[in-house]
Image: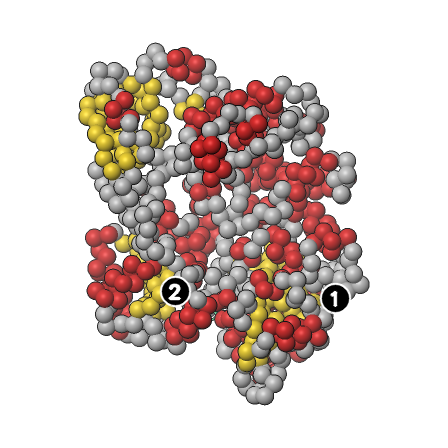
């Protein structure tokens, strides 16, 4: 018996159930037991309807005074819609996909309803509340425990998850310690004791069958600690391994940079100078650099990498510069060609759709396409010192002659494994086991995603951190406005007048095409009334080019277009031939068109604050006043307050801290952005816990570097290796 056994070995499942569980990513006993409740409900203390406010989690008792079955407007999801009256007031309660509830509830019975109060165009409502009739059997048993509320998936209800977790707990708790499948605790006892954390077995019981909130919280804390600890263990292991390997020192005379620096059209900021100094110092050592350059969008990180590239090329080494999208790689390639043309330093570009080099053999001022085979030869012979590319850079066929520096741009877009591959030229285990005489390349990671400090310490625990916390002089502050739907036309007019002045604009939509699945049902009745009609690139393109901006050239850019077509659009946009570019968030990363000064974001509640900040950074490039218009159909106070933070925040770090602080448990993973569970995210609100986990991980590795004496920990930590960030 094992936690990783397929579920059907432990629970009787119909084929339909199996399919739904599979779709929800629930395959094993572990998957169920480690899917924790987002919150708990108690049916003990009802509130008066009169006193409810949006965002509350509440229990009310009352009679159903009207009930009907309807469908959601656009997506035709069946809906039970009722009105509940408790004598102090009335409130609507709605259930999605469970129309039968409208018939089940009897007007003469006083029920308890528990759920979250939402606010929509027609006032307050309860979405998918749990309900109980008085004196029901369930209520009796629930007196003793809280009712867990699990994040639901299509066809997998919270009730079923509670039932399944209960069954599995019973089965597995019976196993004697040490036996395969028993709840063996990966965290050493002494550590648990130091922080007064419950053991794994105790915590699992407490979290699924919480007798009270305090005990549930202690259990959550334990899992939070565990997750951070295991991630730290993995990162600290990488860090220690790096510190035992060696790298090629890249040294050039400080004077050698003078002509390059003086050819730049701007003066470096102090933050850039400090970053450049740190990087050049690092790479001049025989120890591999592992540095993360974190700086807000537009703070000028590329030039730091360019100067390091210059140092490598001048000293006879190679550099590989990896970007997450073809658009971005091509843009860097073009910029680097311009930077290095005067020095005749060859620059190459490799993506899955093309290979190019500059200068071409025949024309020293032009670039040229080359065959992949030829390109790979040039890389392997060292003929091209600066190679920019996408994931194509980490293919097996890609070989370098003397790779001294690996740069990873927008590094949060890559998984740890991908980053490691570029940084080490081969999967990291094999490599570290056989560090060759050449050593490993220095690693410079760059990100514009401002993340909270605790998250940086955790996810990037293997890297040294350099912040570029200063914007180039003369940048104007983006004027951000959250536009109520009624003022849409006015926003378009302002856009028109900016474009007439010669500027260009982006419009960002949450999705490419309209389709029937374009609604969101708040997972636990949260946030939105649902029926958020999501704007799509294609539909907006049609509407805007025909009805709103017929006099302008309006085009679109999204991930489903052919690479050639994407490139043409980007080129035309850069050249100013396109006035309005409608895109998905593909333009989020690094696209740089200084004349584009206006960005309009549709469905802004669909994006995280940090992402919105990234998006709006696209217009912070030129000397003209930039504008950002933010649209949302959501009218909830929470969404509006969040978006207001975007208007007011001084920088991305402030927004990231805000996002972390104000999003509750059970909502953070909605973004899935960082690949950390809700419990883990909770821990990140607590700097002390993060620091403790980090210190414990380090101490443990110092005693037992390969975790040979902690086999369980070893296998657990391995699960966090490939944590992806998107
Ligand atoms: P990011 O940090 O977002 O990658 P980039 O490196 O793309 O930012 O730089 C954004 C823009 O700012 C580019 O057009 C770049 O040439 C310009 N830039 C970089 N450093 C400076 C500076 N010190 N002064 C003025 N402009 C700068
Ligand atoms: Mg960049």
Mark yes or no: residue 674 visible.
Answer: yes
Q: 339 or 167: which is nearer to us?
A: 167
Side of 600 where 22 appears, left or right: right
Q: 435 or 593: which is nearer to us?
A: 435
- Vertical placement of 344 versus 36: above or below? below
At 42% from the left edge and 56% from the top edge, which residue is drawn?
A: 613
At 28% from the left edge and 70% from the top edge, which residue is drawn?
A: 498
Mark yes or no: residue 494 visible.
Answer: no
At 44% from the left edge and 58% from the top edge, which residue is drawn?
A: 614
Where residue 554 is drawn, which disc sits there?
none
Furthest-right residue in this view: 437
- Quadrant the N terminus occupies: top right
- Mark whose residue sits in front, 2 or 1: 2
Packing grade of label 2 (10 A; few <14, some 14-19, many >=20) is many
Q: Position of residue 324 (x, y in %)?
A: 53, 61
Side of 387 where 473 appears, left or right: left
Where residue 557 is drawn, which disc sits there?
2
Q: Position of residue 687 (x, y in %)?
A: 56, 40
- Vertical placement of 269 versus 420: above or below? below
What residue does disc 1 label?
248
Name the quadrant containing residue 372: bottom right
Respond yes or no on whether mark 2 lies under 8 Å from ligand 2: no
Whichever of labels 2 and 1 marks the residue nearer the N terminus, that label is 1
At 36% from the left edge and 75% from the top edge, which residue is drawn?
A: 576
Name the quadrant containing residue 112: top left
Q: Distance between the residues labelled 2 and 1?
A: 41 Å
Q: Position of residue 190 (x, y in %)?
A: 70, 29
SS for tag 2? strand
SS for tag 1? loop
């Amino acid at each position: 018996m094992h936690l990783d056994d397929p579920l059907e070995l432990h629970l009787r499942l119909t084929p339909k159930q199996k399919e739904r569980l599979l779709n929800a990513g629930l395959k094993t006993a572990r998957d169920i037991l480690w899917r924790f409740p987002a919150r708990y409900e108690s049916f003990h203390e009802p509130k008066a309807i009169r006193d409810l406010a949006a965002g509350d989690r509440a229990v009310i008792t009352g009679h159903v005074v009207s009930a009907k079955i309807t469908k959601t407007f656009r997506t035709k999801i069946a809906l039970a819609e009722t009105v509940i009256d408790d004598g102090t007031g009335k409130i609507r309660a709605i259930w999605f996909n469970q129309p039968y509830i409208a018939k089940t509830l009897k007007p003469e019975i006083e029920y308890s309803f528990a759920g979250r109060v939402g606010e929509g165009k027609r006032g307050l409502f309860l979405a998918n509340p749990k309900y109980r009739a008085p004196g029901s059997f369930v209520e009796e048993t629930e007196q003793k425990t809280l009712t867990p509320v699990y994040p639901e998936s299509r066809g997998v209800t919270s009730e079923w998850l509670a039932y399944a977790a209960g069954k599995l707990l019973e089965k597995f708790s019976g196993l004697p310690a040490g036996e395969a499948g028993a709840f063996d605790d990966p965290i050493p006892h002494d550590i648990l004791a130091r922080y007064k954390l419950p053991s794994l077995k105790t915590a699992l019981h407490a979290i699924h069958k919480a007798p009270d909130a305090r005990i549930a919280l202690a259990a959550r804390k334990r899992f939070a600690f565990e997750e951070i600890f295991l991630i730290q263990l993995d990162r600290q292991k990488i860090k220690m391994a790096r510190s035992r390997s060696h790298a090629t020192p890249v040294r050039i005379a400080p004077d050698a940079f003078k002509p390059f620096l003086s050819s730049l059209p701007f003066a470096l900021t102090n933050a850039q100078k400090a970053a450049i100094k740190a990087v050049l110092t690092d790479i001049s050592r025989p120890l591999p650099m592992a540095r993360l350059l974190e700086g807000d969008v537009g703070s000028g990180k590329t030039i730091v990498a360019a100067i390091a590239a210059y140092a490598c090329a001048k000293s006879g080494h190679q550099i590989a510069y990896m970007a997450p999208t073809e658009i971005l790689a091509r843009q860097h390639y073009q910029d680097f060609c311009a930077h290095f043309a005067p020095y005749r330093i060859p620059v190459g570009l490799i993506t899955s759709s093309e290979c190019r080099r500059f200068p071409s053999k025949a024309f020293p001022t032009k670039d040229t396409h080359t065959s992949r085979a030829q390109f790979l030869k040039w890389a392997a012979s060292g003929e091209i010192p600066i190679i920019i590319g996408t994931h194509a850079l980490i293919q097996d066929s890609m070989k370098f002659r003397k790779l001294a520096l690996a740069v990873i741009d927008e590094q949060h877009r890559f998984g740890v494994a991908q980053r490691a591959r570029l940084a080490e030229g081969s999967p990291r285990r094999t490599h570290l086991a056989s560090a060759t005489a050449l050593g490993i390349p220095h690693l410079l990671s760059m990100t514009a995603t401002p993340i909270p400090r605790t998250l940086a310490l955790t996810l990037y625990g293997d890297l040294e951190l350099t912040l570029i916390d200063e914007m180039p002089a003369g940048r104007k502050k983006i004027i951000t406005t959250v536009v109520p739907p009624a003022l849409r036309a006015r926003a378009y007019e302002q856009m028109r007048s900016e474009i007439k002045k010669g500027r260009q604009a982006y419009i960002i939509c949450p999705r490419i095409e309209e389709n029937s699945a374009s609604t969101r049902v708040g997972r636990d009745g949260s946030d939105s009334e649902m029926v958020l009609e999501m704007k799509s690139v294609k539909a907006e393109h049609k509407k805007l080019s025909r009805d709103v901006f017929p006099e302008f050239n309006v085009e679109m850019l999204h991930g489903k277009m052919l690479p050639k077509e994407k490139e043409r659009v980007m080129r035309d946009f850069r050249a100013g031939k396109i006035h309005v570019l409608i895109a998905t968030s593909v333009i989020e990363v690094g696209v740089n068109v200084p004349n584009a000064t206006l960005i309009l974001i549709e469905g802004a509640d669909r994006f995280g604050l940090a992402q919105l900040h990234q998006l709006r950074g696209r217009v912070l490039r030129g000397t003209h006043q930039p504008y950002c218009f933010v649209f949302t159909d959501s009218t909830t106070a929470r969404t509006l307050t969040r978006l207001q933070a975007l208007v007011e925040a001084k920088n991305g770090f402030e927004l990231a801290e805000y996002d972390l602080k104000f999003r509750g448990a059970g909502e953070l993973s909605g973004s899935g952005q960082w690949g950390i569970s809700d419990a883990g995210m909770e821990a990140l609100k607590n700097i002390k816990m993060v620091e403790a986990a980090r210190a414990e991980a380090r101490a443990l590795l110092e005693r037992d570097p390969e975790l040979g004496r902690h086999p369980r920990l070893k296998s657990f930590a391995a699960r966090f290796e490939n944590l992806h960030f998107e």
